Amino acid sequence: MEDDKEKSLPKPSKIRRALQLAGAVPEVGGIFSLIASRWSEKEQARANEFFRAWVQMLEDELREKEATIIEIMARLDLQDEKISARVESPEYQALLKKTFREWAGAESESKRVLIRNIISNAAASTLTSDDVIRMFLDWIKTFSEMHFQIIGVVYNSNGITRGEMWRQIGKEAVREDSAEADLFKLLIRDLSMGSIIRQHRETDYHGNQIKKAPKRTQKGQASRTMKSAFDEDEQYELTDLGQQFVHYAMNELAARIEYDDPLQNT
């Protein structure tokens, strides 16, 4: 026989509290209570499991946010008047609100670290504007970890080809008509359209890109196949915007205070 505690629904006050933590409107709790009164015992047991998992997810998210805030503050020299003034400024507080309102760290530990680095460097560095910082935070939410892996290998190997990118992120050779090849083309397109990476171009004194001379092929010798997703000729580099992203998101400030991260102990 099942334990009575397993069969019983959470109290309406607990349901309402969970909904409030999730940002739902308070009235939803009453709606759930009404629905709960019509559930069978099996449905009630399943609802209990759902609410327990939901509350656990919210608690995990709160712990991640707490750890991230502490790690940020542990990396900042608040004795520095400029950094202290920056942290207290409305502009920086707005960045913090955006970060934790649109929390993307729960998706993975690596994304949480990128967020921490951006916010830490935004307090200590003046390389770019807050508008650009907000865009970097949006990228963390929008892009996948494979996007960031590609950014990393392009940064480490300026002039890298697409074929070499694929190998350096640890992938094996695949067919050109495979889902993996289509995914890789999508990743490159996302980063190119986002002005994060670009094909290498020679520039003039003023930074204008110089057009490449068109390649001439003799009649009948043109290739009959499309360019490979893993092309070995065209070289890629980070744009200036991409380099700023690496500076803010992938450059980790050393912690000034020792901190025992609870996320590492769970």
Image: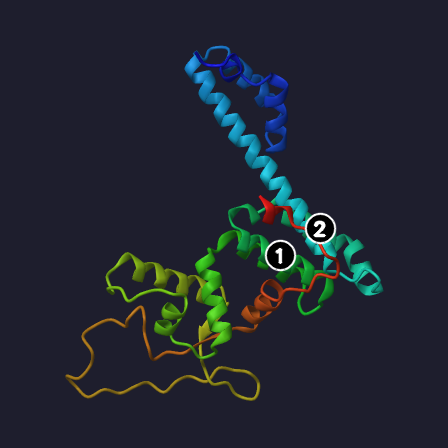
Q: How many tags in the picture?
A: 2
What residue is pinned by disc 2?
A: 70
The image position of residue 196, as x and y in percent, is 50, 67
Does residue 86 sit above or below 26 in this rendering?
A: below
Q: Which mark is residue 134?
A: 1
Amino acid under disc 2: Ile
Observer-nearest of 194 and 230: 230
Question: Could you give the CA–CA distance between mark 1 and mark 2, rounded to whole angstroms?
Answer: 21 Å
Q: Secondary structure at mark 2?
A: helix
Observer-nearest of 31 and 54: 54
Q: Is residue 201 left or right of residue 55?
A: left
Instruction: Tell me the quarter of the picture where residue 198 sits.
Output: bottom left
Observer-nearest of 77 and 198: 77
Q: Is residue 79 left or right of residue 109?
A: right
Instruction: Examine the rendering and report whether any part of residue 98 can be seen.
Output: no
Spot the residue most to the left.
220
Marks 1 and 2, the one that precedes in the sequence: 2
The image position of residue 264, as x and y in percent, is 59, 49
Quadrant placement of the N terminus: top left
Does residue 146 sit above or below 26 in this rendering?
A: below
Q: Is residue 131 left or right of residue 157?
A: right
Tell me the residue at 47%/16% (across/down). 44
The image position of residue 221, as x and y in percent, is 17, 84
Amino acid under disc 1: Arg
Contact (Cβ within 8 Å) of mark 1 with mark 2: no
Tell me the residue at 68%/51% (across/down). 260
Instruction: Tell me the quarter of the picture where residue 16 sits.
Output: top right
Q: Which circle, 1 or 2, is nearer the viewer?
A: 2
Quadrant placement of the C terminus: top right
Q: Secondary structure at mark 1?
A: helix
Q: Which mark is residue 247?
A: none
